[in-house]
Amino acid sequence: MIIRSLAALAIVPIALVPLTPAAPLVAQTPATTATNAAPPAPRVFLIDPQAYVRAKQSSSPPFLAKVKSEAAKAMKAPLLSVTMKPQTPPSGDKHDYLSMAIYWWPDPKNPNGPYISRDGELNPEVKAIPDEDNLTQMIAAVHPLALSYYITGDEAHAARAAELIRTWFLDPATAMNPNLNYAQGIKGVNNGRAAGIIETHNLPFVVDAAGLLAGSKAWTPADDAALHQWFTRFHQWLITAPEAIKEDHEANNHGSWFQEQITPIELYLGLADQARARLALVHTQRIPNQIKPNGDQPLELRRTNSFFYSFYNLQALSTDASVALQLGIDLYKPAKPGDPTILTALEPLLPYDLDHPWPHEQIKDRQNNGACWTLYYVEAHVPGPKYEDALQRFQCNRMAYGYIISYSH
């Protein structure tokens, strides 16, 4: 079933709503300053800002060790840009993001013809275009560095995070154009498609990183305003491009990840009403339509890697839930009596840690990443032995951001 879009509900077009200017930078309290006052909450959107405050105040040795070790590793990350790829997009502009559809292959019956789908089988050709891997690597470095600055006050970490952000988004010589016109193109079929939008689902971590960097001498008001402008333009693409509108309508994990991506961006841009309306639709339509009363997710179970996609969709929905809670919407509760919820879908997955065979098709070795991130969010909202035990059984090695999530309850 297709999820109704915001446009279908005749909500005021987002493009016509005046944008709120970027919030002024708030000076952070360095970790070394003695004070009895709580540190200021950062301007973040994926998780309750007070979770960062509580984490900073806790001074938990395991948490601080993770923060420092992840930041030390991130300091070694190179400066990356979409302009580094050897290929030129159809536009002729290397500033445009480019990638190939990951599960599409040459047709043995027509080697020179259009590529054909082989679900779940990654075509190694996609790795020849580095934009997706470089974007992932950049974000994986930026957030730990910004987190380290907020927690420890380390200006060197803030400076490197700022440099990484400027290189990818702000420097005219290297910045990505704010569109995904050429994401996941299929050879012989199209130059880009809606499914490619999932490749930028981690962009909200950049928005949150900017909030964590507030007050650093390395992250200036001009940087903050320029990043705000980049996301303003990207948001405009997300609400107007045909590919994005199609992705917004997708009823499977792609639609869930679209909401996970756009709602924090809208909150960052001051469009809280639009974000609230989107998340209300997740509550009343997307979750009930995706999840059966017995917890099955049919659109994910039909995939050749059904364990991965069942948890992958729940990871998106539980992230949506973390954002929604800040707007007074609880996606863990049924929208109306009898409706299934995220917890309904999680229940039938819990027995199948890696020691217990998955009863559905899964052509690749199982990974626990999606399971762990889902469980971090759920355990924070619904604490108790069931989910604590599941975190142990799924061998979840909590990263620094996982600790932040745990401080959100």
Image (cartoon, rainbow, N blue to C red):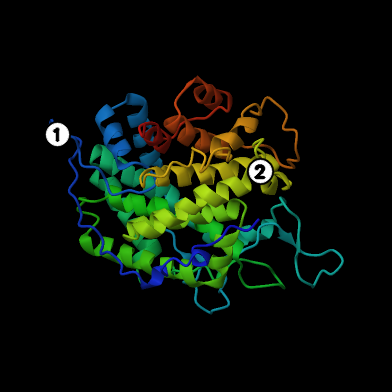
Q: Is residue 130 visible?
A: no
Is 377 placed above or below 268 here? above
Is 371 placed above or below 180 here? above
Question: Which corner quadrant of the image does residue 403 belong to?
Answer: top left
Q: Is residue 146 left or right of residue 93?
A: left
Measuring 71% from the left and 72% from the top, which residue is drawn there?
A: 189
Q: Which residue is mark 1?
A: 37
The residue lying furthest to the right in this view is 109
Q: Which mark is residue 297?
A: 2
Q: Is residue 249 left or right of residue 299?
A: left
Q: Secondary structure at mark 1?
A: loop
Q: Is residue 198 visible?
A: yes
Q: Quadrant of the N terminus?
A: bottom right
Image coordinates of residue 224 in percent, x first then y, are: 27, 60
Inter-mark Cα distance, 2 to 1: 47 Å
Name the front one of labels 2 and 1. Answer: 2
Do tag 2 and tag 1 residues touch (Cβ < 8 Å)?
no
Dot 1 crowding, Cα within 10 Å, few <14, some 14–19, many 20+: few
Tell me the amino acid under the disc marked 1: Ala
Closer to the chain start, of discs 2 and 1, is: 1
Image coordinates of residue 337 in percent, x first then y, are: 54, 38
Measuring 31% from the left and 41% from the top, which residue is drawn there?
A: 148
Q: Nearer the viewer, residue 154 or 231?
A: 231
Image coordinates of residue 173 in percent, x first then y, are: 38, 72
Tell me the amino acid under the disc marked 2: Gln
Q: Nearer the viewer, residue 100 or 39?
A: 39
